Image: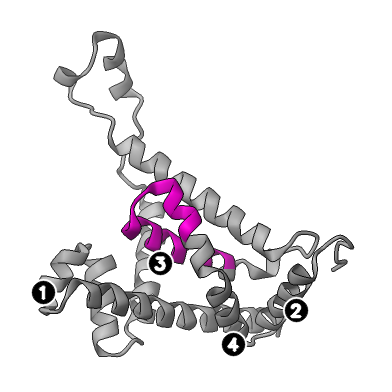
Amino acid sequence: MEIKNNLSEKALIDYEIVKRAISGDERAYSELFKKYKDSVYFMILKMVNNRTDAEDLMFEAFEKAFANMSYYSPQYAFSTWLFKIASNNTIDFIRKNKAKLISIDKDDMQPNDRGMIYSLKSDTLTPVEEAIRSQRAAFMREKVAMLKGRYRRLIELRYFEEYSYEEIANELNIPLGTVKAQLFRSRELLMSILQKTEIARTNEDIY
């Protein structure tokens, strides 16, 4: 790919790291994560004003960026591309949360708004959508099972059983701060496993 001439020295350094990541260097992913995790987190925090949501969304942004690394174009700085992914993902999250606040109780709605309930999208999945979700769930559970002990349990409680941080602390009888710190590490480890899977899949496609 042709690199845009006006990229800064910092952006050019990032591009070299990105090339290493695409070629399968796991340390390159870690470098990018450590370099931008704080700035991505605080950008998202300003948008959602909730530390827990900001932390979750920060990880989602990196997961999406790493999974689509081959689509990154050096015409733009990597940081610009990453922040765009994080921003778009957070905007989607905010929109979904706002949609959940819409009441469909006729008694709580103004007469002119009651017709809205008929246009709300159904949450029922089609058989095809259900099959896709099932496959994805099975894939994620398979990868989570590769984590060890406490790390695996933390991911299961948070994302499969949908426990809050406080509920996890009570379940495991550990301080809330420990839950957050260990869950952060759990997601780092899971991300590493997913990255290896993506690299292996790419290599299979090539050969």
Q: Is residue 166 above or below residue 129?
A: below
The secondary structure making up most of the magenta span is helix
* Mark 3 or mark 4, earlier in chain: 4
Q: How is the image coloured?
A: one colour
Quadrant of the image containing the C terminus = bottom right
* Mark 2 or mark 3, earlier in chain: 2
Amino acid beneath label 4: Arg
Q: Which residue is at 23% across, 27% downward? A: 104
The residue indicated by pointer 2 is 16
The residue indicated by pointer 4 is 27
Q: Which quadrant holds residue 159?
A: bottom left
The residue indicated by pointer 3 is 136
Magenta residues (range): 42-65
Q: Which residue is at 46% across, 54% downward? A: 44
Amino acid beneath label 3: Arg
Q: Disc 3 versus disc 4: distance between alpha carbons?
A: 27 Å
Q: Disc 4 versus disc 2: distance between alpha carbons?
A: 13 Å
The residue indicated by pointer 1 is 171
Secondary element under disc 1, as helix, strand or loop, is: helix
